[in-house]
Image: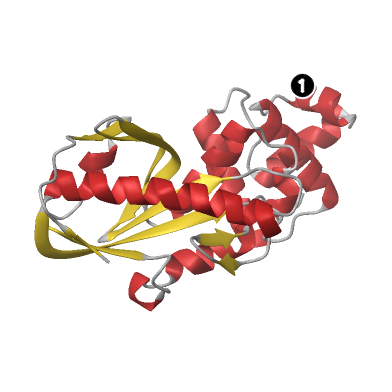
C-alpha cells in the first residue's frame, strides 16, 4: 500500500479530494456516488490521503488535511473548481493559519453609519491582512480587476479609520496589506494586491516593509493590535475622530 499524504497528487487523488471538500464528508459510499468510482477504490484513496478510517471527520479536520496536501502539491486551482464559496474562504483561512497568522472570517467594520464586510481579516505581529476571496472560474483582470480592487480599497480605508479611532494616535507602527485572492489570475499590484493561490504564501512571507506603498498602508497607533480585536464578528468605532496617523 502506498504511504499516506503522498508527495504528488494523482488525478484520482484530486477527484476524491474535490468530492470530500465539496460534500464535507469522508464517507466512502457517498463519495463513490459523487465520483462514480468503486467504493473500494475510494477507500484506498482516502487512506492514502490521510482521510480514511472512521467516517464523520470534522469539517475542520478535512480542511486541515486538504491544506497540507495542497501546499505540498500546489494544486489549489484544480481543487477550487468544486469548492463552494464558503469552503473556498475556509481553505484560504486555513492557509493563513498554517502560515502563522490569526485569521477571522466575515468581519464587519462599522464606523458611525458606515459599514463594510471583509471576507477574512488576519493578524501577525504588527501586520494586518485584509482579504477578499473571489472563487471565480474566469480570470480576474482588466476592468473587473480594477472594479474589485477599488471596492477593497474603500473597505481598507474604513478599516484603517476604525483602528485609528479605537486605538488612537501613537508611535507603534502597523501595516495593513489588502489582498484579493482568486484561482485564475496573475499576480498584480494596483490599489490592492491581486494574488492567485500559488503566489499567496510567497506574498505572506514578505516583510511588509518591503512591499509597495500603496497598496500597503502604514498606521501609527497608540496600542498594539491583538487577536482580541478580531474575536467579535464586528469591529465598531464611534464616529468622532480621536486623532491618528495613516500613510
Residue at 63% in and 43% down: 50
- Residue 113 in which image quadrant: top left
Task: State the image coordinates of residue 127 (x, y, percent, origin top left).
Answer: 31, 60
Residue 193 in the image, given as x and y percentages of width and height: 51, 62
Quarter of the rendering occupied by the C terminus: bottom left
Q: Position of residue 200 (x, y in %)?
A: 54, 61
Q: Seen in the image, is 39 located left or right of residue 55?
A: right
Quick check: can you spot residue 242? yes
Q: Can residue 99 be seen from the camera position used here?
A: no
Crowding near the residue tagged with mark 1, few <14, some 14–19, many ≥20 C-alpha atoms within 10 Å: some
Name the residue: 57% across, 32% down: 86
Locate residue 61 relative to residue 110 in the image: left or right: right
Q: Image point 18% across, 36% down: which residue?
A: 239
Residue lying furthest bottom: 210
Q: Which residue is mark 1?
A: 30
Q: Is residue 53 above or below residue 191?
A: above
| Place of residue 16 in the rendered image (x, y in percent of width and height, measured from the top left) | 77, 38
Amino acid at each position: 500500500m502506498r504511504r499516506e499524504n503522498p508527495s504528488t497528487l494523482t488525478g484520482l487523488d484530486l477527484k476524491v479530494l474535490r468530492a470530500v471538500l465539496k460534500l464535507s464528508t469522508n464517507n466512502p459510499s457517498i463519495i463513490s456516488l459523487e465520483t462514480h468510482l468503486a467504493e473500494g477504490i475510494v477507500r484506498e484513496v482516502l487512506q492514502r490521503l490521510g482521510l480514511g478510517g472512521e467516517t464523520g471527520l470534522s469539517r475542520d479536520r478535512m480542511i486541515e488535511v486538504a491544506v497540507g496536501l495542497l501546499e505540498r502539491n500546489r494544486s489549489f486551482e484544480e481543487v477550487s473548481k468544486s469548492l463552494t464559496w464558503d469552503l473556498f474562504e475556509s481553505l484560504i483561512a486555513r492557509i493563513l493559519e498554517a502560515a502563522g497568522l490569526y485569521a477571522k472570517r466575515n468581519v464587519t467594520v462599522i464606523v458611525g453609519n458606515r459599514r463594510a464586510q471583509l471576507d477574512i481579516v488576519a493578524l501577525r505581529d504588527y501586520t494586518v491582512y485584509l482579504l477578499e476571496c473571489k472563487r471565480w472560474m474566469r480570470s480576474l483582470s482588466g476592468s473587473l480587476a480594477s472594479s474589485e480592487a477599488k471596492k477593497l480599497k474603500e473597505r481598507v480605508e474604513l478599516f484603517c479609520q476604525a483602528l485609528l479611532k479605537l486605538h488612537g494616535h501613537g508611535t507603534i507602527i502597523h501595516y495593513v496589506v489588502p489582498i484579493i485572492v482568486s484561482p485564475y489570475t496573475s499576480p498584480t499590484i494596483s490599489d490592492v494586491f491581486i494574488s492567485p493561490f500559488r503566489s499567496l504564501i510567497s506574498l505572506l512571507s514578505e516583510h511588509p516593509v518591503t512591499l509597495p506603498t500603496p497598496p500597503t498602508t502604514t498606521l501609527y497607533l497608540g496600542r498594539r493590535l491583538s487577536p482580541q480585536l478580531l474575536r467579535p464578528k464586528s469591529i465598531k468605532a464611534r464616529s468622532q475622530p480621536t486623532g491618528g496617523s495613516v500613510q
